[in-house]
Image (cartoon, helix red, strand yellow):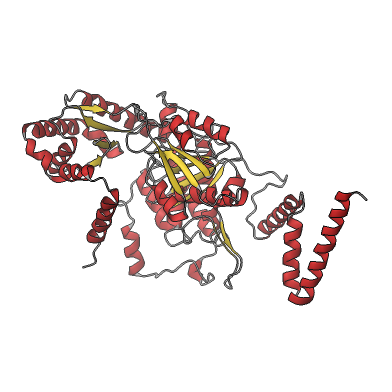
Amino acid sequence: MDCLSLLEHVIVTLFLAVLISIYMNKGREEFFRILLLGLKSLPGMQGLISRVLKGEVTNFVKQVNLDETTKGGKRPPRVVIPKKGIPYDELREAMAKFKAAETNHVEGKIFAYTYTLFDEHFQLQKDCFKIFGEKAGYSENHDALVSLFHQAFLHENALNPMIYPSLRRFETEVVSMAAAMLNGNENATGFLTSGGTESVLMAVKTYRDRARKLFPHIKEPNIVAPITIHPVMEKAAHYFGLKVYHAPVGPDFRVDVQAMEKLITPNTILLASSAPQFCHGIVDPIDKVSELAVRRGLPLHIDACFGGFMLPWVEKLGYSVPDWDFRVPGVTSISADIHKYGYVVKGASVVMYRNEELRKHQIFTYAEWPGGLYGSPSMAGTRPGGNIAASWAAMRALGEEGYMSKAKELMEATIKLKDGIRKIPALEIIGEPCMTCFAAQSTDPEVDILAVSDVMETKGYKMEKQQKPSSLHFSILPHHVPFVEPLLQDLAKSCDEVKANKTLAKKGSAAMYGMVATIPDKAIINDFIVEFFSEVYKCN
C-alpha cells in the first residue's frame, strides 16, 4: 500500500470513528447530518445529490398537477409575444377559464393568502383600480382590458405557486415572452418583481449569494458600475453589504471601460451597465463591457429597467441601437420594467438570467419554520396577483405589432422634440440618445437650465432636474404625442424669460442645486434629503 492509499485509509477510518461517536452520543439526526456533509464533500457527490433532488422535485410537481410536460416527455414550446395582439374577447375567455379551474376561496376552502370582504368595502377597492370612471364604463381598449385583469385577480396572492396556478402560468409565460424579446435562448429564465428597484435588488442578492458559494474567501464584495447607473444599485449594495465602485463616463456619456477595469479588485463579484442609463438615454458600450466581463471571469448585469421594453422595438423599426441584450455573450442578467414601456399597471418588472443555475441563487429558503417549508423567489412574500395577470394581458393584447406601433409613434415625437430643442439657441441635446428619452442642457451662460425648469413649472409642467451637468430629463410618453409643439414653444419662451431676468437663477431649484454644488461634504446633502423625506411624510 503506497503512502497516498494509506492516508486515504486512515482518513476514512477516522471519519467512521467520528460518525460512530456522534451516533452514540448525539443521536440519529446529528449522525445523518454529519454523514451527509461528509458525502457532499466527496468528488462527484454534489452532482449526484443534485440529480436525486431534481428527480424528487419533478415527481412532486407531477403529483400536485403543476407539470407541463407533454405525454412524449417534452416541455411545451417557449411562449413568445404574439405577432398580432390577441383579441380582447379571447383574452377575457381565457381569464374566465383560468379562474374556473382554481379553488375558489369564496367557498371557504383556502386557509391563507386571500383576505377579502365581499361587500361595499370590496367594491370600493375595485373602484380605486379602475382606469376610467363609472360614467365612461369599459370600452374596447388596452387600458380597460388591463384594468379588468387586474381587478379579476386583485385579491389573489402568488406567494404559494400551488394555491393559484393561473398566477404561476401568467408569470412563467410573461417571463418566457420577455426572455424571447431580449434574445435569450431556451435556457433564459427569470422572475417577476414589483418594479425596477426590486429587480435590481434581486440581481445583486443573486450575485452576492453566488459569490458566497463559489468564492467564500471574499468577505467584502464589490460591484463595478458607471457613475450613471441608477441609484438603486447603491441601494442594493447598501441593503446587502456590498460596495459600488463607480467608473466615470467619457465625453459621449458612455462608461469608460478602461476605467472600469482599473476599479476591479479580487473582491469584485459583478459588473453592471445600463441600456440605456436614465439620465441621458444613452446605452453604455455593452459589447466592450462584455469583453471585459468575459476576460475577467465576472458576471454582467444590464439595468434595462427603463429601456428593456422599448429598445427591442426601436431596433426593429430600423433605428440604430447598439447590441446590449443576451446576444452579447458576457451579459448574464437583465432587469426590465413592464410597467414602463410594457404598458401595464404599476408595479411589474422582470429580472432575467441567462440560465437556471444563476437564477437559483435568487431564491430564499428556510426549512426550520414550524409553519412549514418556506421559499420565496423575491423580496416580497405576498405578490399581488392583479399585477401578474395584468402583465400577461398587456403583453398578449398588444403583441409585436402593437409594441412596434407605439414605439414608432413615440420615436417620431421624440425626434421632433429633439430637433425642435436644437433650434432653440440656448439649448443642446446631451450625447446621442437612441430611444424615447433624452436630456437637454444650456449652452448659454446667461440661461440657467434649472431656472428654465422653474419657469416651465409656472406653466404647469413637472420637470425632471439633473446635475453633473445641470440638465433637464425628458421621457417621452404616449400622453406627450399631441403636445410636441406647445412643449417646444413653452420651452423657448422659458429660455427667453430666464435670459431676460438674471435673478431667476438665484431662486427656486436653481438656487438649491447651486448651493448643493458648493458643499464639499455630501454627507450633509444626504442629511438634507433625509430631513426632506421626514418632513413631507409627516402624519400630522
Pick the front one: 388 or 45: 45
Q: Position of residue 181 (x, y in %)?
A: 50, 36
> Quick check: 181 above or below 196?
above
Quarter of the image where one finds residue 297: top right
Q: Position of residue 507 (x, y in %)?
A: 11, 44
Pick the front one: 280 or 183: 280
Residue drawn where x is 25% and y is 29% of the image: 417
Quarter of the image where one finds residue 533: bottom left
Q: Position of residue 360 (x, y in %)?
A: 59, 51
Residue drawn where x is 54% and y is 71% of the image: 109
> Quick check: 48 above or below 454?
below
Quarter of the image where one finds residue 295: top right
Count of marks placed on residues: 0
Left or right of residue 334, residue 294 in this image? right
> Quick check: 355 above or below 440?
below
Left or right of residue 438, residue 372 in this image? right
Pick the front one: 40 or 193: 40
Pick the front one: 202 or 517: 517
- Residue 130 visible in image: yes
Q: Position of residue 233 (x, y in %)?
A: 42, 46
Left or right of residue 219, residue 526 in this image? left
